[in-house]
Image (cartoon, rainbow, N blue to C red):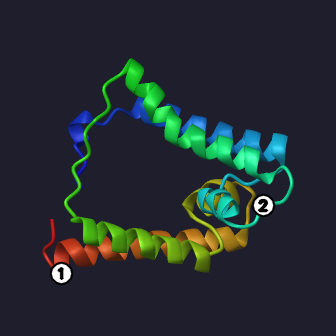
């Protein structure tokens, strides 16, 4: 995957970040929950407590449905993924395992945990960002992958 820096639009990127922050804040203030995607989806896969399924389903439907609504108003860019299905599946499984070990994902730790000044979230964010940087460096500069 490559980024076309000439097509980068800071305004919409800022608006998207604000919307993510507002949504995470509203979920915390109005529902007392952290907007960590792995925890929300994981809660759907476990036996549910009373009242836990509805808000989780609504949240996931919002994540899936919002791009569909956006397509009504604007063209959606076509992503270019340079990895095959096997690599993509392996990467997804590794991310899933990592979120279990870290007790959360980027949305839970980086967006919600850092805003709550959680030291555990700071450590998790530094580790997964560092691992991402190291992986890109090794893949692009040492192994010569695109």
Residue that carries the numbered disc 2 in the rendered image? 48
Q: Is 40 in front, or is 18?
A: 40
Q: Taking 110 as reference, is 118 left or right?
A: right
Percent of width and height locating residue 126? 54, 72
Q: Taking 127 as reference, is 5 left or right?
A: left
Name the N-terminal-most of marks 1 and 2.
2
Q: Which mark is residue 142?
A: 1
- Residue displayed at 62% across by 58% down: 41
Q: Looking at this view, name the residue that lies furthest to the front.
A: 47
Tag 2's secondary structure?
loop
Q: Looking at this view, name the residue that lies furthest to the top.
A: 73
Q: Taking 128 as reference, is 40 left or right?
A: right
Percent of width and height locating residue 64? 50, 41
C-alpha separation, residue under disc 1 versus residue under disc 2: 46 Å
Quarter of the image with the N terminus is bottom left
Q: Taking 135 as reference, is 45 left or right?
A: right
Quadrant for residue 84, please give it.
bottom left
Quadrant for residue 43, please give it.
bottom right
* Observer able to see residue 130: no
* Observer able to see residue 111: yes
Quarter of the image with the C terminus is bottom left
């Amino acid at each position: 995957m490559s980024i076309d820096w000439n097509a980068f639009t800071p305004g919409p990127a800022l608006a998207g970040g604000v919307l993510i922050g507002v949504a995470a804040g509203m979920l915390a203030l109005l529902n007392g929950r952290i907007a960590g995607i792995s925890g929300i989806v994981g809660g759907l896969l476990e036996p549910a407590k009373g009242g836990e399924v509805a808000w989780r389903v609504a949240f996931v439907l919002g994540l899936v449905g919002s791009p569909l609504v956006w397509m009504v108003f604007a063209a959606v860019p076509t992503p270019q993924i340079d990895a095959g299905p096997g690599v993509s599946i392996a990467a997804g499984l590794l991310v899933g395992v990592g979120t279990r070990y870290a007790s959360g994902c980027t949305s839970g730790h980086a967006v919600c945990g850092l805003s709550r000044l959680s030291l555990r979230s700071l450590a998790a964010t530094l580790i997964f960002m560092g691992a991402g940087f190291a992986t890109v460096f090794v893949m692009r500069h040492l192994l010569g992958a695109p």
